[in-house]
Image: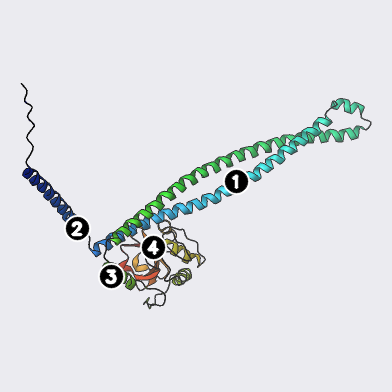
Amino acid sequence: MASHRRPKQPSRTRVTVLTATAAAAVALTSQGAAQAAPKPSKDEVKSKVDALYEDAGRATDKYNGAKEKQEKLEKQIGDLQDKVARGQEELNDLRDGLGSMASAQYRSGGIDPSLQLFLSSDPDDYLDKASALDQLSGKQVEALKKIQEKQRDLAQQRKEAAGKLDDLADTRKELGRKKKEVQGKLGEAQKLLNTLTAKEKADLAAKEQRASRAAGDRVDLGKEAPASNRGAAALSAAATQLGKPYVSGGSGPNSYDCSGLTQWAYAHADVSITRTTYTQQNDGTKIGRSQLKPGDLVFFNNLAHVGLYAGNGQVLHAPKPGAVVRYEAMEYLGNFQFGVRI
């Protein structure tokens, strides 16, 4: 006969022991995780934040390049659309003219030319009219050729405009991606900064303040002669923007990113240079550090940053988020690549 005895339940003591063991295991795991990922120091946070700002600067540069391309495409598309509209008007005029010619020929061609000659009371008058009819026919042929050429031109222009509209759509998508990338990097940096204590944040702010050389501060720029009047004018213009904030994508006059400042400065020296660091490197002649003169562009960290050489080892630049346009010694700006003389 089958047994109906209830299965033996674990004792309360055993359950308590198991629970305590599990709790201890959880505690040890948590402790191990805490030991595996200690809170980063202030200097480590600063180093990571600076790296994120550098990445954000590169992404900003790509964003600026895409934005510049977008503006050019929009202008080219506008010009093409205006050209197509004018071409369509010309085509319509040509068609209207051809229609008028055809009507005139029909009206004058109701009688066979030989019969018109036979019936004409004035053969000389008829010959004049016949000449006019021949000319009219020639004009028709010419008008047809012009219409065909205009149709081909318009088809090509419409195709070109359609291609540029596709490019514009792709560029706008690229803009959106780069904007998200910039915002993501800046967001990561802010999260890291939020891990600092109030005192650590104050220490970093004080250090940043010491590094910042706003308008009115005395900076020893030495007495180096600028390479050109253009460089001198650009440097002088940039100096009027000391203390203006760094903003990703800023190109003046209220805020700047690094290449936005250099482009703005040279524009005020009546020199047009491109918008991004990776294109500004090709806007002049590359030179080494020993050749630098005030007004030359100086590039750092694999084209992540650009500024204006100000003399005596100092650079006038828009540094990074949270900072302002300022003078700063070259040795604090990272890996120097080369200068460019405009």
Q: Amino acid at mark 3?
A: Asp
Task: Give how far apart the Cα atoms at labels 2 and 3 are.
Answer: 21 Å
Q: How is the image coloured?
A: rainbow
Query: Is tag 2's residue or tag 3's residue first in the polypeptide sequence?
Result: 2
Q: Amino acid at mark 2?
A: Pro
User: Measuring 43% from the left and 57% from the top, which residue is drawn there?
Assistant: 276
Q: Which mark is residue 203?
A: 3
Would you identify the image quadrant in which residue 249 lies?
bottom left
Q: Position of residue 153 (x, y in %)?
A: 61, 40
Task: Give how far apart the Cα atoms at labels 2 and 1 are.
Answer: 61 Å
Task: Give how far apart the Cα atoms at labels 2 and 4 are.
Answer: 35 Å
Q: Which mark is residue 38?
A: 2
Q: Amino acid at mark 1?
A: Gln
Q: Position of residue 229 (x, y in %)?
A: 48, 71
Which residue in the protein does label 4 denote? 306
| Residue farthest along the right direction in this orientation | 121
Res. 342 in view: no
